[in-house]
Image (spheres, rainbow, N blue to C red):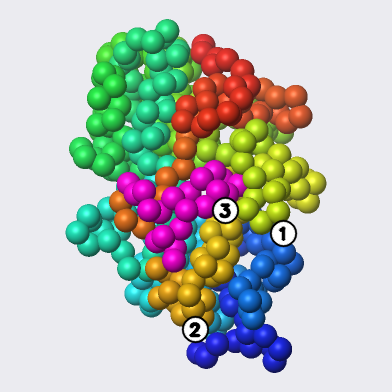
Amino acid sequence: MGEISDGRERVLTIGVAVARSGRLASLGDPLDFVTRLLEPTLSGLGPTGYRIRLAARDTRSSAAGARQAVRELARDEDAKIILTLAGTEVLPAVADACEALGVPCLSSTFPWQVYYYGRGADDAHPFDWTYHFCWGLDGIADTFADLWERADGGGQQAVGCLWNDGPQGTWSRHPQHGFAPTARARGHHLVDPEPYREPVTGLEGHISAFREAGTDIVTSAATGQDLGLFRAQAAGAGWQPRLITCSRWLAYPPSVSSTGRRPAQADVATLVYWTPSHPYRSSFDGTTTAELAEAYEQGTGRQWLQPLGLAYALFEVATHALTAAEDPADRRCVADTLGRTRLDTIAGPLDWTAGPVPNVATVALAGGQWQQGTRHDYELTVVTSGQVDQLPVGGDLITT
């Protein structure tokens, strides 16, 4: 398809592949909100002679829907770059479709090792069109090790691993690129029973293995449903871990059910990559993290979400690439510009020239815990600032 024009100026389209239906629809809320929030602003931020427009397509929470969304954005909308967030199957499908079609893609909220090695790249054969920014499995392990050591005054721990047989568990165990080697390098002993299949119906075997190993700290990448089952069955067996760390689904706030039952995530510690307290600003207009969080809560009536900051940064980086590219209408020029990008964003400083591998920039992590709050039922409390300079700590780690 030829370049879009509105008769007065040429138009550059940023495509957005976002879940608006299906099981991941709620995970699409941050990207959908930011798309609508920034659409008026971006129209005036294009390179000289161009106007930026946004076009979105629903991935329908599936790999097939993701591929269809990319085809429509590339063919019908002439997108010069496509953005996406979230989904163990959906995000790689978007990126792979862009790679196949020769369309620049920028994504986030997916550990970079799974994005890079899991899609078949290696140091000798990086991707041509697809770019990413996120934390890594090694960063999660270091963050969680900080929390385990804080729970025990600095000692090394035996840690029970509640890991499934899917990508989350498989990559957590990976001997070179996963969570496990970093945790073990910190001196911690991992107790890893047979992996379970989602959705799990019983975790008694894991509970028995953890008790027999004498561990009272558990780490996981479980869904909220499976984590809730684990905690209920552990309590029924008369056992309760002193601390649970979990990386999956924990970006989204828990809430008290209509029966008053505590949510599965209550007092669970997790990774922190973005909060209203992070010392970052928008490269567009200086909007602070606190102002973005407030805009979301005022606009939706819902509690702010960690992925908001990364969703916003997708548009910052995409706009920078279109503006800095020698020919913003040429997808190859846009992709090459992404690979040279260094930008301070509302999600923090992002640098694609620094690695850790080609086409990837990293996001700094801190440690947090879902604790009972004042404005909301449960709030993400920063308990260790980790790698994030000038991030205030909001409370102490709670153990049982």
Query: Which stretch is magenta?
Result: 337-356
Q: Are marks 2 and 1 in contact (CB under 8 Å)?
A: no
At 41% from the left and 60% from the top, the residue drawn is 340
Q: What secondary structure is found at the residue carrying circle 2?
A: helix
Name which residue type carries label 2. Answer: Arg
Q: Front-most of 72 and 347?
A: 347
Label 1 crowd bin: few (<14), some (14–19), many (20+), radius 10 Å: some
Residue lying furthest right in this view? 298
At 71% from the left and 70% from the top, the residue drawn is 44
In the image, residue 307 sits, relative to residue 17, either above or below, namely: above
At 55% from the left and 21% from the top, the residue drawn is 383
Label 3, label 2: how far apart the Cα atoms are: 25 Å
Which is more foreground, mark 3 or mark 2? 3
- Numbered mark located on residue 313 in the image: 3
Quarter holding residue 372 = top right
Name which residue type carries label 1. Answer: Leu
- Numbered mark located on residue 37 in the image: 1
Q: What secondary structure is found at the residue carrying circle 1?
A: helix
Q: Are marks 1 and 3 in contact (CB under 8 Å)?
A: no
Residue 342 shown in magenta: yes
In the image, residue 259 sits, relative to residue 94, either above or below, namely: above
Quarter holding residue 197 = top left
Name which residue type carries label 3. Answer: Ala
Which is more foreground, mark 1 or mark 3? 3
Point out the tag, 1 or 3, that comes first from the N-terminus.
Answer: 1
In the image, residue 201 sits, relative to residue 31, either above or below, namely: above
